[in-house]
Amino acid sequence: MDIRVTNISSLEWTGDAIALGFFEGTEDLTGDLTGDLAQLDTKLAGTIAELIAEVEFKGKAGSTAVTRVGSSTPIRKVILVGLGKADSDKLDSYRTAGAAIARIGKRQKCKTLAIHLPWGDRNPALVTQAITEGILLALHQDHRFKSDSEDKPLTLTTIDLLGLAGQEAAVEFAQKIISGVTFAKELVAAPANAVTPVTMAEAAQNLASEYGLALEILDRADCEKLGMGAFLGVSQASAIPPKFVHLTYKPEGTPRRKLAIVGKGVTFDSGGLNIKGAGSGIETMKMDMGGAAATFGAAKAIAQIKPDVEVHFVSAICENMISSTAMHPGDILTASNGKTIEVNNTDAEGRLTLADALVFTEKLGVEAIVDLATLTGACVVALGNDIGGMWSSTDTLATEITKASAESGEKFWRMPLEEKYFDGLKSDIADMKNAGPRGGGAITGAMFLKQFVKDTPWAHLDIAGPVWADKENGWNNSGATGYPVRTLVHWVLG
Ligand code: BES
Ligand code: MN
Ligand code: ZN
């Protein structure tokens, strides 16, 4: 499918369907259609005005309506799409509109589709990018695990963005970024018998060879040499070997910055001997490598976008399983920075894997580290499924992430690194425990991670909620969301 930018006007365009965008409260909706819209309406025998009146279309963000015009008309269907309030400077409504239009175009079996949205005084490149992102996110379909796919291949062959001639670069940028998001989504959506530490390492190898990234994979013995007792403790019950993956993107010339992204990569979280019980969502725990998936997705996007920033992508990948070689609750592990951890709960495993990943990453001498993890159910309780938690050791990094998240539309809320809450992790026998009290569980998780970063500015993103969508929501289809690949890319680009 081609997404084209063109200055063909809505009056000249011919094809299966045209989607028209409206701001809430615009004169076109409250009074009579004006300008080109009025002319187009005349050409289409009054269909647009009729549809607006019939469905009482108000232009609310994400709202849509569709009708058939006729068979001999140059345009066969009209789609209305709401853009919400005209004064909002956010681009989210364009991403949502792109997604909504694409879904209708697909459902209506259109081959050719035009999109004509007003953008007011917004930057047309950013508008183009947001619409394209919405389209590509909504049209992604995943039939890898169906023997007989019900969904026919996409009928859509071309989508023309009217009035946006010259914005080819913005379309290409969106395509690169969404290829990374889609990569992450497919890793998260695949079950734990398909995506294992070994296949994740293979995926990293493929990325490295296809996009020219440097790759270092540490096997169990290498991790042992580095003293990664916390990571290896989690992996030790699994029949599948752990893989520690380090991808590097290096720009040509001197990098403007040197950054690192670290992702939790637990390909299945059974809970270990503190096994997850009924109602715990154990059957969804294939998504516990969402942090690593987003790390790889960001690597794929960044390797194509080629910014002047060096970026390290690190993930300690393993399964949290049960066997006679499993960690016992109460075991004491020694992490690669020498700190000892009493494992009072084997289900708080993500932080154990991240501990060694963070120590490794800080030794790379980067300017800032961001980790992503489906770390706690408590974060889902606190912020729900639409908002991730963000903790940061410096205000500067928190501000950078907040800006990137506003650009991507992936929401994060800053949470406190409350020193006192480390008290909940005090151990009588070791330097710390890995699990604290129920209350403030997402914060204690962050406080645990903090012990493994000495002085590099660091942020922790808990994505346990938004990594997965139970139902279609804005530009996200149901299932894996690829969160927060787009935020990471914006952060790296600055
Ligand atoms: N992977 C889970 C967190 C999780 C829960 C992600 C729900 C997505 C949805 C994590 O390893 C875990 O089990 N955390 C425990 C921590 C507790 C034992 C301190 C939790 O949240 O209950
Ligand atoms: Mn767990
Ligand atoms: Zn987990």
Image: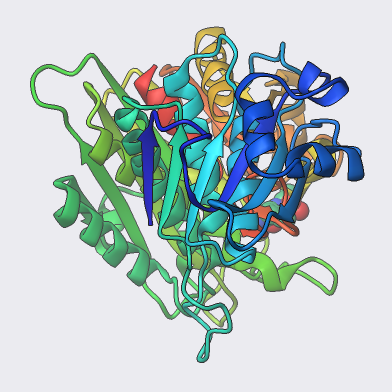
Vertical relation: 447 (above or below) 339: above
Q: Where in the figure is residue 74, as x and y percent of width and height?
A: 53, 51
Q: Which of 179 and 418 is in front in this view?
A: 179
In the picture, measured across the screen, residue 365 lies left or right of residue 457, that is left
The image shows residue 192 at horizontal and vertical percentages of 52, 74
Residue at position x 17%, y 55% in the image:
210
The residue under the point 32% across, 37% down is 172
Q: In the rendered view, does 102 fall on the left or right side of 363?
A: right
161, 43: nearer the viewer: 43
Residue 490 pos. (x, y %) = 43, 26
* Quarter of image, res 363: top left
Quarter of the view holding residue 414: top right
**In the displayed structure image, the side of residue 5 where residue 87 appears, left or right:** right
Q: In this view, does 490 lie to the left or right of 19?
A: left
Res 426 visible: no
Please determine whether, in this image, residue 245 is positioned above or below residue 427.
Answer: below
